[in-house]
Image (cartoon, rainbow, N blue to C red):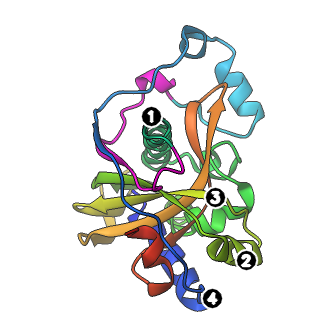
Amino acid sequence: MRLFRSRIGLLVVLIIGLSACEGARSGHTSPSVRQSPAVSGATSADPERCARLARRGFTPCPPTPDKMQLPPTTIRNATNGAISDATAQQWGRAFQLTEAYYRWAMQDNARAALTSGVLAEPAAAANLFGADLKSLDDAKKLGGQLMDKEGSMPEVKLVSVPPSLQSRITQQSLVAKPYAMVALFSGTTSRSIRFPDGREIDLGTISSDVQLLIWGEFKSDPDLGAIWYEHGLYGCQYPEVSSVCQPH
């Protein structure tokens, strides 16, 4: 789940102090079901897929897109007409697939998948996955395995990123994009380190709802399918970004 890594993103926002920015109007709402986006038969049956991903630094080999379990969510278009509802649904499903790969990586302790540059901009790894990478590194250092239990993602909302916020993003040496997903994470998320003898060390539990602004772009990856390629995230509870996360 992203709740643990969201704490890093929220801290970055707090320290740097983003400028106030404008939002877009809320739009069409449509439910999304627990199924993978359509993928070609070649993607799911390609025997060279795992070798290509390994060459790209993405290891171990994940399930094919059609085998990934997407977190159920409702996808909304909140761009005030800048993006069509059909495109918003497509991008929202791509975000679901990226989230599914992220959860797989955490549960499989696949650290390289987060830093390879296949799912997200490598320069944004600390912003996107800082707390996650620390948890994975701590588990490995102690000779255990990270156990990641996830909450839910009830809503994903496509929003426009105003120029003022894009400027701030660029000033932080991150790649700015004109659109972002506002994801609501809910339920209980917990992490622990499990050792071969069955012992566990609790790393914490988060039960409060959290909203994250995750900017990026739709990308059709030959090995992962249609994903939301991520370039960075901010927490939504600060005034500087709340107007973007909660468009009027």
What residue is shown with label 2?
A: 172
Secondary structure under tag 2 reads loop
Question: Relative to residue 236, is residue 114 drawn left or right?
Answer: right
91 relative to 206 in the view: left or right: right
Q: CA distance from mark 4 to mark 2?
A: 9 Å
Query: Which label's residue is closer to the chain start, 3 or 1?
Result: 1
Q: Do callouts 2 and 3 mark residues in contact (Cβ within 8 Å)?
A: no
Cα–Cα gap, marks 3 and 1: 18 Å
Q: Label 2 is placed on what type of residue?
A: Gln
Which stretch did the figure color magenta? Answer: 63-83
Q: Which quarter shows the N terminus?
A: bottom left
Neighbour tally class for label 1: few under 14, some 14-19, many 20 plus, Cα within 10 Å: few
Work out whether mark 4 precedes mark 1 in sequence or the reverse, and give the earlier one: 4
- Of the numbered discs 3 and 4, the one sitting upstream in the chain is 4
Secondary structure, mark 4, is: helix
Residue 86 has which mark?
Answer: 1
Please rate how many residues cluster around mark 3, counting C-alpha atoms within 10 Å: few if below 14, some from 14 to 19, many from 20. some
Q: Which residue is mark 4?
A: 16
Sooner in the amino-acid sequence: mark 2 or mark 1: 1
* Magenta-drawn stretch contains 7: no
Determine if the magenta segment contains residue 67: yes
Helix, strand or loop under label 1: helix
Q: Are marks 4 and 2 in contact (CB under 8 Å)?
A: yes
Residue 181 percent location from the top left of the image:
48, 56
Q: Position of residue 224 (x, y in %)?
A: 59, 30
User: Amino acid type of disc 1?
Assistant: Ala
Which mark identifies residue 178? 3
Give whichever of discs 2 and 3 has the lower sequence position: 2
